[in-house]
Amino acid sequence: MITTLVACGALLAGAALAQVVTRDPVQALKAILAPGHGMHFTETTTLSDGDDERADRRRKGIFEFDAKGGAKALDVTTTGGEHGHERVIGFNHDIGGTSYWSGGLIGKWLKKGKTWWKDSHQLHLWHTDLLGYDEQLVNPAEPATLAVLLKNGRRSGDTVTGAITFEKLGQVSRWVEHSTHAGWDPDTRLAYTVTLTSAGLVSRVQSTFTFADGLDELVGRTLHVDTRYSRWGGKVSIKAPDPRETTTELCIEGICDWRLPS
């Protein structure tokens, strides 16, 4: 009887483990998507030309979801890179949205006594302009994107590996659609590895691609982005900076009423 109970227990444990491993990640994601909720992330980017490899920038921040898994708002701090520490806050990455920039190159152009530059110019709402050309192009909070990654990739335990072109990724991902990369070579292949938690949520995305076009200094170089996610579905609150510390004008080459049209 004891032997039988042990065997049954092992079978039940195995069945439970199998259920965890095979849980549908898309359904697990949809269950936590709601305005006012989001997730935290940390990110490291590495740019290589085959001979020289260097850590370019590190990011950490918060994304607030919209009902479809897009980024309704974001608050991200970046360190490293050419212009050093900078922080951006963005709302609604489309017409009618607003972005706030602090530090980095913008910090050198701010009026005295101001900490943030406020802008509603369409181009500056794209997250690749807010965060940089080297940010993570794969948005695992979009159910349609996650579904395609799972379908295209090969799953082994808690990891899924595969490759997808910019064109195919852009067909399902608004995150890519609202990036400067959307206008680059559509045949560029992005290799990815997605790591899942036991709850079916994404804990890590690693992506790699080689620039076929775009900025001259990037063509032929390979970008690797390693992003880790946590606190999926938790409540988040992203607020605009204090208006007293904000300006819509910049001081460039001695001209302090310089601004972009909205």
Image (tube, rainbow, N blue to C red):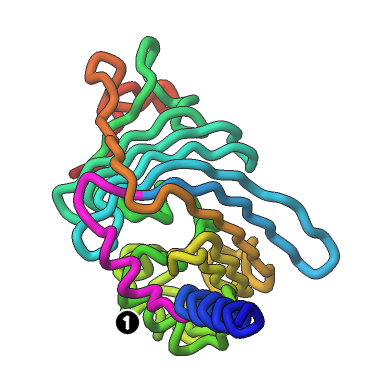
Residue 190 appears in the picture as rendered: no
Q: Nearest the camera: 220 or 222?
A: 222
Q: Quadrant of residue 48?
A: bottom right
Q: Is residue 47 magenta?
A: no
Residue furthest to the right in view is: 51
| Relative vertical location of residue 147 with respect to residue 32 in this rendering, above or below | below
The answer to whether residue 83 is seen in the rendering is yes
> Which residue corresponds to the image point at 22% horizontal and 45% vertical from the top-left?
36
Q: Nearer the viewer, residue 5 or 53?
A: 5
Tell me: 134 left or right of 96: right
Outermost residue, left side: 96
Q: Residue at x 61, y 83 (%)?
A: 7
Does residue 126 lie above or below 213 as drawn?
above
Q: Nearer the viewer, residue 126 or 110?
A: 126
Q: Is residue 87 left or right of residue 33?
A: right
Q: Position of residue 199 (x, y in %)?
A: 44, 65
From the viewer's perspective, is residue 161 above or below residue 227? below
Q: Residue at x 47, y 50 (%)?
A: 230
- The residue segment tinted magenta is 22-38
Secondary structure beneath dot 1 equals helix
Task: Look at mark 1 in the image and give the residue it sits on.
Answer: 171
Q: Where is residue 128 shown, x and y percent of the image?
A: 42, 56
Question: Percent from the top left, x then y, of residue 239?
Answer: 26, 31
Instruction: Report whether 109 appears left or right of 114.
Output: right
Is the C terminus in the top left, top right, bottom left or bottom right quadrant? top left
* Amino acid beneath label 1: Gln
